[in-house]
Amino acid sequence: MTSFYGLLCLTAISIHLSCSFSQETNAFPAYSSFSCTVDTMEGVDSIEHRTVNVNGINMHIAEKGQGPVILFIHGFPELWYTWRHQILALASLGYRAVAPDLRGFGDTDAPSGSENYTSFQLVGDLIGLLDAVAADQDKVFVVGHDWGAIIAWHLCLFRPDRVKALINMSVAFSPRNPKRKPVESLRAGYGDDYYIVSFQEPGAAEAEIAQIGTERVIKEFFAYRTPGPLFLPKGKWFGHEPNTPISLPSWLSEEDVKFYAEKYEEKGFTGGLNYYRALDLTWELMAPWTRAKIKVPVKFIVGDLDLTYNAPGIKDYIHKGGFKRDVPLLEEVVVMEEVAHFLHEEKADEINKHIYDFFQKF
């Protein structure tokens, strides 16, 4: 999904498209007149939940508010819950925020077999969701992070007619290289212990997680702030002894960890890991979109401590013309200082303002 989860896209996947958008005028209030950082579970409890049948699966969604739809697409190891601050803030500002648990995650169905987790199924799920929840809106706003950013690029690529504007975080667009499969490229560059490569063998990562414990794995991933490649050697994931204390970042509470851990204990990690296991199949199927370009209005946000931003060649690509060449309607790139991968949780109020200000243009 990338990133420390989405780096896969930066290294290997192609995403382009041909899009148009319509501008609308509206009378929304100024962002500064609202307090948009939501603090606790009390606000989260006001978010509504339901299950929608889409593309042959049952998809759980969280939603709140009335108005133009903003579709929030999460990554790994996340859930709809990762957008709790954004849902509450943007709903209070006149939007309808919709955040699904993606295929394989949380309370959404998890089909067996990695072949059921290509970008084509994932985007198909979201089109079915939009048909169900936004049938009266020709186009919607989209926000993606990590794997959600990859899926958002592909949503724009396959169905530009459904996207008004996009804010993507952490995982920049990367053109498809027709001569290099993603996994073999990553293995050649980083070795077998690189996290995406280590995720490939069915059951292997699941066994490691079972040995470490779900709650601890969640804490390790969310607390990760090293701006470099993530390696997960067999039997030595994260390089810590099992009883080593983990200091949670200030923006993540034990209650938050418990929420994630309970859902992953119930569902397991296989669904999310299958996204990585379908990388090469997605690459093969996306051959027709080689050298295509993204043509929806885009704002891109990344933290300077995010390992996606520190991957080889990425800063040059983002800042020296490559990104703008491939995404010609890229309007702005924001690099947040001293911020790591989960920027929408770490700096929730700032991200809320970025989302609101950008979408107000349309």
Image: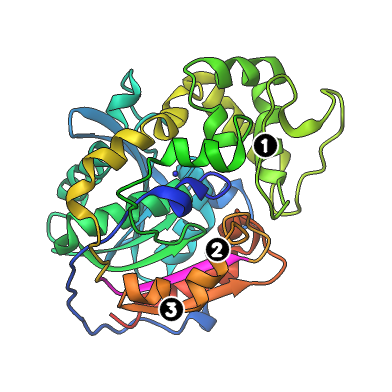
Q: Which residue is mark 3?
A: 321
Q: Which residue is mark 2?
A: 313
Task: Say which residue appears at 20% left-offset and 54% top-offset.
Answer: 289
User: Could you tell me if residue 213 is visible in this image?
Assistant: yes
**172 or 325, which lies in front?**
325
> Main SS of the magenta segment?
strand
Quote the CA–CA distance across marks 3 and 2. 12 Å
Q: Is residue 118 at all visible to an observer of this figure?
A: no
Q: Which mark is residue 231?
A: 1
Specify the segment rendered in magenta: 296-303
From the top left corner, tell me how far across and down residue 53 is, in percent: 20, 32
Dot 2 falls on a residue whose secondary structure is loop
Sequence-first disc among 3 and 2: 2
Name which quarter of the figure residue 234 lies in. top right
Residue 32 position within the rendered picture, expressed as x and y whole percent measured from the top left:
54, 82
Q: Amino acid at mark 1?
A: Phe
| Up/down of 304 relative to 286, above or below | below
Instruction: Specify few, some or many for label 1: CA neighbours under 10 Å numbering under 14, 14-19, or 20 or more.
Output: some
For badge 2, the amino acid type reads Gly
Residue 202's disc is none
